[in-house]
Amino acid sequence: MKKKIGTVLCLLFAILLLALGISKDQPQSVLTKASKVCLECIGIG
Amino acid sequence: MDKKKRIIIQSIAALAQNANFKGFFTGKIYDGKAKSVCVPGLNCYSCPGAVGACPIGSLQNALSGYRFKLPYYVVGLLLFFGVLVGRLICGFLCPFGLLQDLLHHVPFPVKLKRFRADKWLRIVKYVVLVALVIVLPICVKLTPFFCKYLCPSGTVSGLLLALGDRGLFQAFGGLFAWKACILGIIVLASVVIARPFCKYLCPLGAIYGPLNKVSIYHLECDPSKCISCGKCSSVCDMCVDPSKDPNSAECIRCLRCVHECPAKALSPRDGVSGSFRKFFLKRKAGEEKNLG
């Protein structure tokens, strides 16, 4: 039972964070960064 | 589930996350709207095939920006994936996990499973998560430390990009040499040890691992069926004993133990269908009682 409560709480927290992030237009900033090659990530820098 | 079926699922997942096949020939990355969504596994968004964003890269970008913003969206997605399936993502959906699994199939006279430092080295991935993914990017702006200095997925992406755009080879310098060394060590280690990067270095494993304890999809061991033969722990590449701790933070849910268990004591469960099953069984029992 404790595990189930933990699962539900974590799931609700995840959904809350997701909704908060979407309301702050954070997917757009992820898109902006991810649509350009990260030179440091590929070893140039 | 046997190894072959899992490799097929892993390959399909890797292809789906890298479905921009054109990019491999042109050396250009995909920049469509799908890149606003993070994929669950470690898949560099600078990979020419990547159609989604890497969650660790996106997390660092958000933390290392000039204006500090809490990355609700990326953390929410990671938590959501983790609560749904835990480290099943490592076992079935991560392209870098697939690469390590394939390398471990390469014949080699010595295959290491347990060694003295193994237990301590597993703590390193939590240090990597805290230091390289969270603390250092917050302190030093615009520097994704994990991606820049450690991530082997980025090195593979660089090589793949350079195949399509030969000019990139000339731009590679000291940093690439460092990253290529790390990639080389991980490749060689993968031949000898199963999934060394997942065990010791992956920050995604450090996030999903503890969520194994609460994930909806989980493993259960029926103690009334378990004959304590030790078969499950002997076949486990992650050196977990599923009969004692079926939801260990180290378990990547490859389900090999479930497949190999002679007494069928281990079984994967998803909380939803389990609850439905219990509900209908109770209802059926109630109806039978009423009829009786």
Image (cartoon, coloured by chain):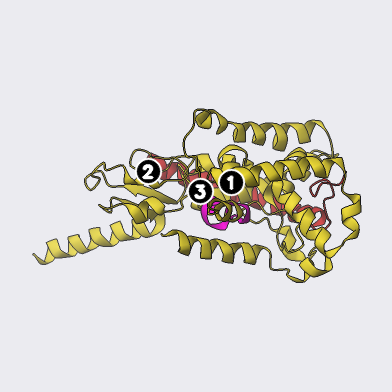
Chain colours: A red, B yellow
Query: What mark, if any, has residue B234 been given in the picture?
Result: 2
Does residue B232 appear left or right of residue B95 in this picture?
Answer: left
**Dot 2 and dot 1 within a common chain:** yes
Tag nearer the camera, 3 or 2: 2
Q: Main secondary structure of the magenta part?
A: helix
In the rendered structure, are the residues bearing label 3 and label 1 in contact, judged by CB atoms less than 8 Å apart? Answer: no
- Between B161 and A29, the one lying in front of the other is B161
Q: Real-space Cα distance between discs 3 and 2?
A: 22 Å
**Dot 3 and dot 1 within a common chain:** yes
Secondary structure beneath dot 1 equals: helix
For marks 3 and 2, the one nearer the N-term is 3
Mark 2: which amino acid? Ser
Q: Residues within 10 Å of mark 2 (few under 14, many from 20)?
A: some
| B95 within the magenta span | yes
In the image, the segment drawn in magenta is B89-97
Q: Real-space Cα distance between discs 2 and 1?
A: 19 Å
- Between A8 and B265, the one lying in front of the other is B265
Q: Residues within 10 Å of mark 3 (few under 14, many from 20)?
A: many
Question: Which residue appears at 38% of the width and 54% of the height?
Answer: B268
For marks 2 and 1, the one nearer the N-term is 1
Secondary structure beneath dot 2 equals: helix
* Residue hosting label 3: B86
Question: Which residue appears at 58% of the width and 46% of the height?
Answer: B190
The quadrant the C terminus of chain A occupies is top right
Query: What mark, if any, has residue B190 been given in the picture?
Result: 1
The chain to which mark 2 is attached is B
